[in-house]
Structure formats: structure tokens, C-alpha cells
Amino acid sequence: MQPFTKLAGVAAPLPLINVDTDMIIPKQFLKTIKRTGLGANLFDEMRYDLDGKERPDFVLNREPYRHAEILIAGDNFGCGSSREHAPWALLDFGIRCVIAPSFADIFFNNCFKNGVLPIVLPQDQIDVLLKEAETAQNPVFAVDLEAQTIERPSGNRPFAFEVDPFRKHLLLNGLDDIGLTMQKGAAIDAFEARRAEAHPWLAMQGA
């Protein structure tokens, strides 16, 4: 998993509440278990019409938001079914940070497991960020995970955010569940060697 340290990128405003995982990546695109290719269908029903043509009024179909790496959203983002494809689709599009007043629990957890940083801020600060993202000539925000701050294009005082220390450690070091386990690789190998020596028939059964 790619480490998340400091991200400077365009922020796209999506001031909608209750954006569920089927809106993020519709169910017909869940046939794959690959984490790539889903970005093309991120927010599919909002991005495209029935003929597959882009809807020009949708934020991610407009410049400079086509290249957004940060999404500023409304309350209860990621609600609905517990599909891990939702953060996969965001990440494949290029979005590595979502800022909202609140998130659905499962989506929130899945973001951390896939290298996406979900940030919770009070609604009044979200409103400020949305306005800056909509009106700034160059809506580039800088999210510093180590310092836990969001620098704004206006140059005004950065906003601070909270993050669980353990999850922060995982993101800073690019560790998903597998990576975290593999940090114990030497201890696992030593255990396997001791077990094979003490119980050789187990190794034979697994052959």
C-alpha cells in the first residue's frame, strides 16, 4: 500500500448528504476482485447519462476537478452496503482523501485499509472548505497527515483534524493488514520452523 504522508491536490466539492456505496460504485461493476479499473465508473450514474456520455454539470466532469485527489462531501458519506469496491474506486480514480462531517463505519474502516484517508470535520469547517473548493482559482489543498492539518488555497489558518494514532501509523508507513502481518515475518518463520521440527507429520500432511 502506498504510504500517505502529505497530499497536495485539487479538491472537488460534492455537497451531498447520504452518498451511499451504490452511488460511489454501482452494483453492476462489482464483478471484479481487482482493485484497478473501477475509477472509470466512480459515481457512474451521476457522471454519465443513459447513453454513456458525460454529464457536463457533474463536478468530476469539469476542470480542474477531473484531476481531483481530495473529495469534500456531506454528512454520512459511504453509507449503504459494505462494499470494499467503494474505496477501491475512489483510489483508482485518484482520490486519496475524503473530508466529510461523518462517515458510515464500515466505509470509514475500509478507507484506512486501502490507503484512503477519511477526515471528519465539523459542518462549519466543511462549509468553508466547500466554498473554497468551488470558488478558488486553483483549488489545491494540502493534507499533512503527520501534522494533522489541512492547508487551504486561501492561505488562511489551516484546519486541524483528529486521527486514530494506530491508523495514522499504518497510513504513514503504507501498511495494510497483510503488510502489518508481514512485519512479523521473522517470528512467523521461526514458529513454523519450530512446529515442523516438533510435529513433522503436520508438514507431511500439508505437502
Image: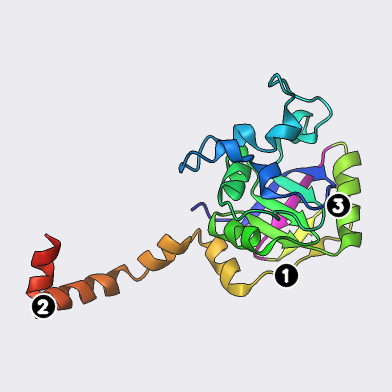
Q: Position of residue 176 (x, y in %)?
A: 48, 60
Query: Which residue is label 1 attached to?
Result: 162
Q: Inspect the magenta stretch and tell me whether residue 188 lies in it.
A: no
* Residue 163 in view of the camera: yes
Q: Of the residues tagged 3 and 2, which is closer to the observer?
A: 2
Q: Position of residue 69 (x, y in %)?
A: 68, 43
Mark 3 lies on a secondary structure that is helix
Q: Residue, x 61% and y 32% (percent of image)? A: 40
Mark 1 lies on a secondary structure that is loop
Spatial separation of the CA atoms under disc 1 and disc 2: 48 Å
Q: Inspect the magenta stretch and tell me whether residue 141 lies in it.
A: yes
Q: Residues within 10 Å of mark 3 (few under 14, many from 20)?
A: many
Q: Residue, x 72% and y 23% (percent of image)? A: 50
Query: Which residue is label 2 attached to?
Result: 199
Query: Which residue is label 3 attached to?
Result: 129
Q: Amino acid at mark 2?
A: His
Magenta part of the chain: 138-146
In this rendering, the answer to whether 97 lies above or below 24 is below
Q: Of the residues tagged 1 and 2, which is closer to the observer?
A: 2
Q: Position of residue 179 (x, y in %)?
A: 42, 61
Q: Along the polypeptide, which appears first: circle 3 or circle 2?
A: 3
Q: Amino acid at mark 1?
A: Glu
Q: Residues within 10 Å of mark 2 (few under 14, many from 20)?
A: few
